[in-house]
Image (spheres, helix red, strand yellow):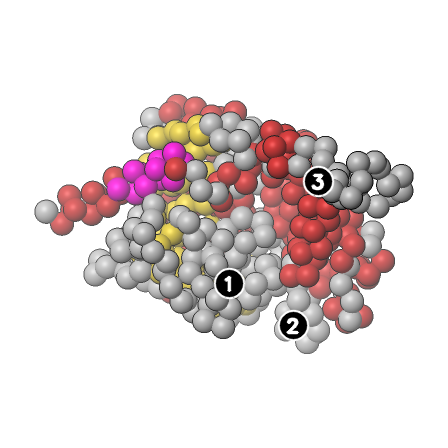
Amino acid sequence: MGSIGTVTPQAMHFAEPLRLQSGAQLADYTLVYETYGALNADKSNAVLVCHALNASHHVAGTYADKPKSVGWWDNMVGPGKPLDTNRFFVIGVNNPGSCFGSTGPMHANPATGKPYGAAFPLLTVEDWVSAQARLADRLGIAQFAAVMGGSLGGMQALSWSINFPERLRHCIVIASTPKLSAQNIAFNDVARQAILTDPDYHGGDFYEHGVVPKNGLKVARMVGHITYLSNDDMAEKFGRRLRNAAETDDYAFDFGVDFEIESYLRYQGDKFSEYFDANTYLLITKALDYFDPARAHGGDLTKALASTRAQFLIASFTTDWRFSPERSREIVEALVSNRRKVTYAEIDAPHGHDAFLLEDPRYLGVVRAYYDRIAQEFAGEAA
């Protein structure tokens, strides 16, 4: 297995407005994306990879000017990897509202010439999927071999199967959920409040003030990061170890950093506040909250998934308490009730929600085997 190597982002401009579920519209926008591998003659080997909260179109490979800028799912996508770019043409798209190139709150609003800021319209998972479908149209891809995502990306994959059932043959949903629990919504709101109450937020128009609400972003990331790790993983990595245990075995008796876990979370928060946009964080967490395809069907997920036509791989992780295996099983049960073909894997992994990004040979093996099956379909069609 090798790296995809050096990659270059591309951009696609759309002059026609994108009508949003809120009733608003996004006019004159750009989507940034990357592609890996080669599209076959009949364009049947394309796979769309949908990104999670703080990720982007940069799924695999590195940039020539930034050799350490490895794609967020580089262990999954590349030559000889589970999603093998020797066989599949892989597309990663940066969703509208993000801060990694596609039109978002920091870009100029055509109506004012100033950054959108808080005026950028709220988006839903379904809005993102509609934007992705437009990009697929431009690329001449009528149907994906698979649409795949983890966490929030898994929500997008599920939405593809509902809203564009004829446009994908396989749907791969990893460490995801059919809707957020009240607890998850609560965590998201606490994170948003940290940003909204930061004095440097300025009602979302902090760009014009030349500041960044770093404290709010830092706390938001710390809250979120706690939910990505399992209790066992945190205990093994940090326990109750003191940060300066080599120097003293006593507490500092102040409100600074005593424990290693405190140091780790503050480091993650500081790092996040340097590269992520506060308005984007608000938008994306609200899109997470709103996702609930069963809502239009009286809360009946089986009815919500009745329109699907794809085959499914659903995967979860035992220690993921943010999007627990029970939520994945809800999806599986609803699909089975609709007589869809479903493969379900529940991986016993200690890493919590973040497990979908990590090197677990059993997990990667499941995904590899599933893509092997998809590739055999091509062979059967060609025979």
Q: Residue 90 placed where, x, y %?
A: 36, 56
Q: Residue at x 45, y 51 (%)?
A: 73
Left or right: residue 376 versus residue 360 is: left
Q: Which residue is mark 2?
A: 108
Is 309 situated above or below 278? above
> What amino acid is found at the position of numbered circle 3 in the picture?
Ile
Q: Residue 212 placed where, x, y %?
A: 76, 63
Viewer-proximal residue, 14 or 285?
Answer: 285
Task: Report helix, strand or loop for mark 2.
Answer: loop
Q: Which residue is mark 1?
A: 68
Q: Residues within 10 Å of mark 1 (few under 14, many from 20)?
A: few
Does any portion of residue 101 appear in the rendered image?
yes
Q: Which residue is mark 3?
A: 261
Q: Residue at x 60, y 59 (%)?
A: 97
Dots 3, 2 in contact, CB < 8 A:
no
Query: For the residues marked 3 and 2, what is the alpha-carbon distance in whole angstroms?
Result: 39 Å
Viewer-proximal residue, 322 or 178?
Answer: 322
Dots 2, 1 in contact, CB < 8 A:
no
